[in-house]
Structure formats: structure tokens, C-alpha cells
Image: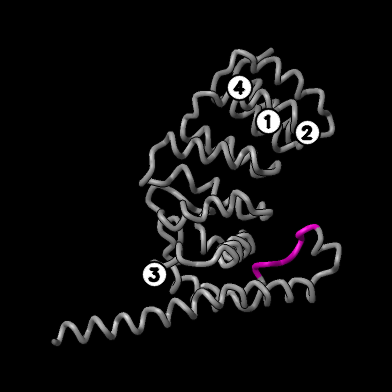
Amino acid sequence: MYHHSISINITRVIPVLVMNATSNIKQHVEQFETWRKENHSPEQYAKGYTDDPSYPAWNAIDSDLEALFKSGTLEGLSSEEKEGLIYLIARNWDIGNIINWLTISSVEPISYLGCTEADFLHLCSFALNSKEEDAKCQFVKVLPFLKTISKTEIRLLLLDFYHNGKTYTKRMSLFALQAVKYPELEALVQTSWKKETDEFYKIACLNILHALKSKDLKAYVKEAEGYKDYSFLQENVARIKEEANIR
């Protein structure tokens, strides 16, 4: 009887915690949006140039999300709540607590708030289909460090993010694919070189081709030299020419 009564108490307490955590996601999103609009110009808001790390209620968000992750009930959330969670992950971009993409390594957790690999993988499809690029790039950065799925599965997810992301997410995807040794990476880099004009994307492509010891590296270096206004690109060109002994 003693153990039975404990079981009843646990089942009564856990749903209350879950209800509080899930219902607060919508509230946090609404309050965050209000704060962003009230504290930034229309132009800043439209371009996403908002100082999200200074939002005054991060502690409350962290507390609620930590309770949610530890409850093990994320999959039971509504689609709206999961999309709201992706929104909060995007706002957390410069902080990296919800998804630890800033310092992720083989020994660092994927989240400081307790998001498990199962939770992370469940949220991948919501991040993938979201308009929040600042969330997508976090997922891309963390994917190579997952331990519960195969490299083949990770590569497929990274390719999905590459094809569904904008320039920064694409660039991060290339580096992540390099980390998991995607066998068709060189061809993907060469194809994307023609489609993307962003300076830092060009830098990424050159450095990956250099790392892969591509036989076509010299041709891309010569083409990159034509982007005279891209000073950071030219710095990389000079270094790569020296390292690869390109004359």
C-alpha cells in the first residue's frame, strides 16, 4: 500500500508540472514578440536586428523549458507549442542555453536545460520547416555530435537543412557535412559556389575545397581573386595559395 500511494502522488504531480510548462510556451512567445516590437524600430524588427539576449524574462523561460525537458513529455505538445519552442530557440541564438550550439563538443551536452537527443531529433522537423533561420543553424551545428543515430542519418538530416535553409544555414551545413565526412561534399560545394554570392559563403567553400585537396582548387582560387571588394575572402585566398603552393 505504501508504494501504491507514492505512485498515485507522482501521477498527480507530474501532469500539473507538464501543463504549466506547455501552456507557458505560448505565453512566452507572445510576451517576447511584444517586447521585441516595443523595444526596437520597425526596421530592426523586420530585419531581425533585435537584441534578444537582453530580454528580461530569460530566467523564466529557462526554468519552464528545463521543467518541460525533464518531464519527458515534449512529444505530447501541440504543433503550435513545438513551433513556439523553435521560436524561443531562435531567440536564444546568442545565448545557447536551450540548444548548446556555441560550445558543443564530444564532451559538452547538446543542451544546458536538459533537452535530450530524442527531444532534439523530434524537434528537427519543426526546425526544418520553420522560418526561423536562427534556429536552423543551431540544429545544423549540433547534429554531427549526436550519438544515438548513424552518420548516414545525420548526413541526410544535414542535407535537408542545407536544401531548406538560407545562406548562413547552408554554410553551416557544409561545415557540418565536412565533419561527418559526407562523400559527395566536393560536388555540393562546387555546385553551391555558383549559386551563392555571399562573401563568407565563398570563404567556406574555398576552405572546404582546400581541406579536401580538390584538384579544382586552383581554378576556384583564381575565380575568388576576382572578388576584389571582398577583403576577408582575399585574406583567405592569400593564405590558401601559400598553403597549397598555388602560383
Q: How is the image coloured?
A: one colour
Tell me residue 76's x, y (percent).
46, 66
Determine the residue positioned at 63% across, 21% down.
242
Gap in Å between the C-alphas at discs 2 and 4?
A: 17 Å
Q: Is residue 181 left or right of residue 172?
A: left
Gap in Å between the C-alphas at discs 1 and 4?
A: 21 Å
Determine the residue positioned at 55% across, 60% down.
96
Which residue corresponds to mark 2?
197
Tell me residue 66's x, y (percent).
45, 71
Gap in Å between the C-alphas at discs 3 and 1?
A: 45 Å
Q: Amino acid at mark 4?
A: Ala
152 vs 78, nearest the viewer: 78
Q: Is residue 74 left or right of residue 137?
A: left
Stretch in magenta: 47-53
Gap in Å between the C-alphas at discs 2 and 1?
A: 16 Å
N-terminal label among 3 and 2: 3
